[in-house]
Amino acid sequence: MKKVLMGVLCGLLMFSALSPDVLAAPLRRGRARRGTRQRVPLQVTPVPVIINEPTLIRERTVERPIPQPAPAPAPAYTQKTSIGGQVIGFSAGYFGGLPALAADIWFPNMLDSAKLNLRTGARYAQGADPDNVTRKNALVFLDGVMFLQDETNLKTYLGGGLNVLAYTTGQKSGSVGAQLYLGLETGSWHSGSLYVEAGYGEVRTGFSPSIKGLAVDIGYKTGM
């Protein structure tokens, strides 16, 4: 019995010797276990608010150039003639080196081309041949004429063709000759125009030396 009392006294002394903090620690742990749970603060994450705004579509303005009227094409060169469309001409000068006169008819707008013309007529040339025999020669010719420039007041052209000696002195027909020339014309075929031509001409009899040399004409032509 004494031993029991002695043990209780020793236990009390030891219990009283302990610090209040030591004694309070179990109580605090127990209260912590039994007490309310520690509150964790809520973290509020802001949610972005998406507002669908109407998209403004701007109409694209395309500046288109204002079409300008095309310039009027330059008028093609046309021969203005009167009745029938033909033009008659008269000229005087030299053919093959012989004094000559000619009368001709021009047919414009051949093959639907305003610059292409056909020319036909008769020419009379008189003079001495290379054998110094004076001859009178009547020729019929056919030429093609191409206008190179179509200005209103001044036109140039190139012509050439063949001639046939229809008559020569002695009442004999001759052979085929040729001519080639460059011409310059001013004026209008409707009201009349002047022209000058220079080139080469040949008269062939077929039985005597050919007459050939400079061909120069100054003439006038107008619509029929």
Image (spheres, rainbow, N blue to C red):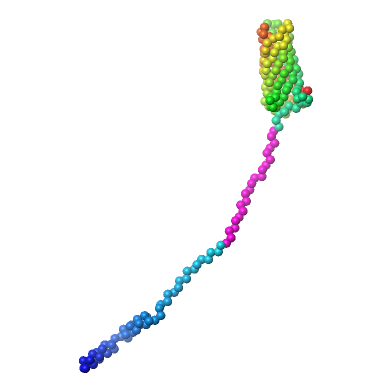
Q: Classify 108 as above or below 29.
A: above
Q: Residue at x 58, y 58 (%)?
A: 55
Give the tally of numbered discs: 0
Q: Quadrant of residue 66?
A: top right
Q: Is residue 170 left or right of residue 29?
A: right
In this view of the protein, can residue 47 be seen by the observer? yes
Q: Quadrant of residue 88?
A: top right
Q: Quadrant of residue 186?
A: top right
Q: Residue at x 56, y 62 (%)?
A: 52
Q: Classify 70 as above or below 16.
A: above
**Which region of the structure is painted magenta?**
53-74
In this view of the protein, can residue 192 be seen by the observer? no
Q: Is residue 90 left or right of residue 46?
A: right
- Most common secondary structure along the magenta stretch: loop
Q: Looking at the figure, which quarter contains the N terminus?
A: bottom left
Q: Residue at x 51, y 66 (%)?
A: 48
Compare residues 161 and 191 and report the one nearer the observer.
Answer: 161
Residue at the far bottom in the pictured view: 1
Compare residues 84 and 103 and report the one nearer the observer.
Answer: 84
Q: Looking at the figure, which quarter contains the C terminus?
A: top right
Compare residues 56 and 190 and report the one nearer the observer.
Answer: 56
Q: x and y percent of residue 59 in the render?
A: 62, 53
Q: Classify 182 as above or below 41.
A: above
Q: Residue at x 25, y 91 (%)?
A: 9
Q: x and y percent of residue 188 in the render?
A: 75, 26
Q: x and y percent of residue 27 in the render?
A: 34, 84
Is residue 87 a member of the stretch shown in magenta?
no
Q: x and y percent of residue 219 in the render?
A: 74, 19
Is residue 70 a member of the stretch shown in magenta?
yes
